[in-house]
Image: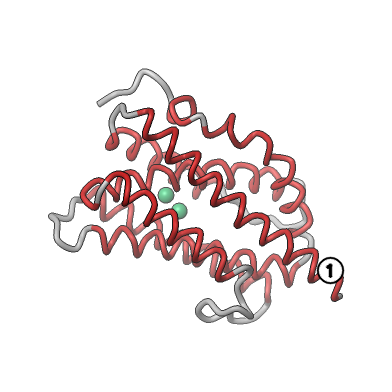
Amino acid sequence: MTHSISPWTASGMKDNNARFESRVRSFLEHIVEDKPRHALFLNMLAMLEHLGSRKIMLSQMDRVMTQDTLQHLAEEARHAYFFKRNAERVAGKALDGWSDENTMSRLPAAMYFGRLDAGITRVVGEEAAYGWVSLIIELRACWLYAIYQEVLEQSSDHMSLKSLLAEEDHHLAEMFDMCGEDYDTLKSLSAHETELFEKLWGRLEEELVANREAA
Ligand SMILES: [Fe+2]
Ligand SMILES: [Fe+2]
């Protein structure tokens, strides 16, 4: 199906998140210049991408796997690999797995994902969960990575998120088509995600400040 409006307009996501933009940008500007902390942040993103790909795999266990879904799963797994590889590049050492020591706000990040998944599944049901959870996460990924890319371009780190962003954009369009025109549900699920994201971001900011004070 084709929508007459964009997922941004339909969800109200950008408008709802406009108040966070400068806060998120300033956190990212600090973290990209703080290598040890940047490595832990990148490893957290690797964990979230990995949880995303794992979620897709689990949600399709009892279904007929399609080429589109396999591609989506493979791309999310590759994003996890991309962030893990860059986390290790910045750290200058291996960062195996995800522990409290090598992952920024590991538990709050895992809780963000778990609560989001559970909350959306409760509203839309198991059957529709894959599309809706993905759609809401793709909105966040596109929003966050676009700001991150702008910050990286101004920084001393030359990591580029451009090809990753193109894939997330494609997933967003695909999931938007899959979920149909229930824009009321889209608005309320996106608002729910924004609340969870604000909590997670608050924890990341606290951790950055605590580490600076300890340094
Ligand atoms: Fe991704
Ligand atoms: Fe994606």
Q: Quadrant of the C terminus?
A: bottom right
Residue 124 x/y as whole percent:
29, 44
Quick one: 163 or 205, which is closer to the camera? 205
Taking the spot 33% from the left edge, 52% from the top edge, the residue there is 72
Q: Quadrant of the N terminus?
A: top left
The colour scheme is: secondary structure
Quick one: 106 or 2, which is closer to the camera? 106
- Residue at which label 1 appears: 212
The residue furthest top is 4
Splitting the image into 4 quarters, where does residue 183 fall?
top left
Splitting the image into 4 quarters, where does residue 116 fall?
bottom left
Taking the spot 65% from the left edge, 70% from the top edge, the residue there is 40
> The disc labelled 1 sits on which kind of residue?
Arg
Residue 82 x/y as whole percent:
51, 63
Taking the spot 29% from the left edge, 36% from the top edge, the residue there is 179
Taking the spot 56% from the left edge, 41% from the top edge, the residue there is 143
In the picture, measured across the screen, residue 213 lies left or right of residue 110, that is right
Q: Residues within 10 Å of mark 1 (few under 14, many from 20)?
A: few
Residue 62 x/y as whole percent:
14, 61
Residue 149 x/y as whole percent:
64, 46
Q: In the rendered image of this protein, does residue 170 appear above or below residue 78?
A: above
Q: Is mark 1 within 8 Å of ligand 1?
A: no
